């Protein structure tokens, strides 16, 4: 009986040795989740960097309005600044969710360069500070956006707000030029 069992085992083992059907599907099933997670992480990181670069361009554009005195001379409001920079970023972001923070001070100690809070205690977007500044003032323009990120095995690296979004900021610091009012 033991001989028969050994003979049966040898005969079936040689049949399994040559079987390759379905091996590709099994290998794909093992590799696919990691591959898809990597693709999502690459897409998320690329989107984050592209939005950040566009917000930086928008912050520079807004800073030019303040630096040259155009915003001060025409008394531009925060909503008007948003309307001015929106065409620069509207292909990537919802302009209604932009956070615009404009600070001015006669000295560097009066300015805060730390990242403002994106959300208030009630979980709503902050409206940001808004100060037009005067000739010779130092100013900081910060434009932020809560970028939605995909929750997943690698998405937690970008999520910084705790609500499925990452804070993306564009920043410009400058001194206001003398201008005729």
Image (tube, grey):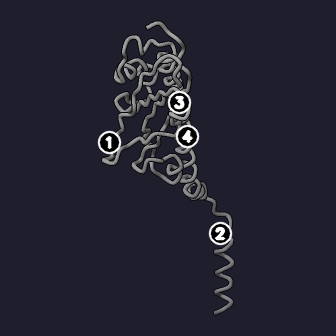
The residue at which mark 4 appears reads as 45
The residue at which mark 1 appears reads as 124
Comparing labels 4 and 3, the label whose residue is closer to the camera: 3
Q: Can residue 38 be seen in this view?
A: yes
Q: How far apart are marks 3 and 1 (CA)?
A: 22 Å
Q: In this view, does 39 lie to the left or right of 70?
A: right
Specify which label sits upstream in the sequence, 4 or 3: 4
Choose top left, top right, bottom left or bottom right for residue 41.
top right
* Vertical relation: 45 (above or below) 5: above
Q: Nearer the viewer, residue 89 or 66?
A: 66
Q: Nearer the viewer, residue 123 or 154?
A: 123
In contact (CB < 8 Å): disc 1 and disc 4: no
For the N terminus, give its image quadrant. bottom right
Residue at x-position 46% and y-position 43%: 166
Specify which label sits upstream in the sequence, 3 or 1: 1
Q: What element carries label 3?
A: strand
Q: Is mark 2 on a helix, strand or loop?
A: helix
**Residue furthest to the top:** 180
Q: Distance between the residues labelled 3 and 2?
A: 67 Å
Q: Nearer the viewer, residue 33 or 22?
A: 33
Q: Distance between the residues labelled 4 and 2?
A: 48 Å
Label 2 packing within 10 angstroms: few (<14), some (14-19), many (20+): few
Q: Nearer the viewer, residue 35 or 88?
A: 88
Residue 162 percent across, percent down from the top left: 42, 51
Residue 108 percent across, percent down from the top left: 56, 31
The residue at which mark 3 appears reads as 171
Residue 155 percent across, percent down from the top left: 50, 49
* Vertical relation: 134 (above or below) 159: above
Specify which label sits upstream in the sequence, 1 or 4: 4
The residue at which mark 2 appears reads as 15
In contact (CB < 8 Å): disc 4 and disc 2: no
Q: Distance between the residues labelled 4 and 3?
A: 19 Å
């Amino acid at each position: 009986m033991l001989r028969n069992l050994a003979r049966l085992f040898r005969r079936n083992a040689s049949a399994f040795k040559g079987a390759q059907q379905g091996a590709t599907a099994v290998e794909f099933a093992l590799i696919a989740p990691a591959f898809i997670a990597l693709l999502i992480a690459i897409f998320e990181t690329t989107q984050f960097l592209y939005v950040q670069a566009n917000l930086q361009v928008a912050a520079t554009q807004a800073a030019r309005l303040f630096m040259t005195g155009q915003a001060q001379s025409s008394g531009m409001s925060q909503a008007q600044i948003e309307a001015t920079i929106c065409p620069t970023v509207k292909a990537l972001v919802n302009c209604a969710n932009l956070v615009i923070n404009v600070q001015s001070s006669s000295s560097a100690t009066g300015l805060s360069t730390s990242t403002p809070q994106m959300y208030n205690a009630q979980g709503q977007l902050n409206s940001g500070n808004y100060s037009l500044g005067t000739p010779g003032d130092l100013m900081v323009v910060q434009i932020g956006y809560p970028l939605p990120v995909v929750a997943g095995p690698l998405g937690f690296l970008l999520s910084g707000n705790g609500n499925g979004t990452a804070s993306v900021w564009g920043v410009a610091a400058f001194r206001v030029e003398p201008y005729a009012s």
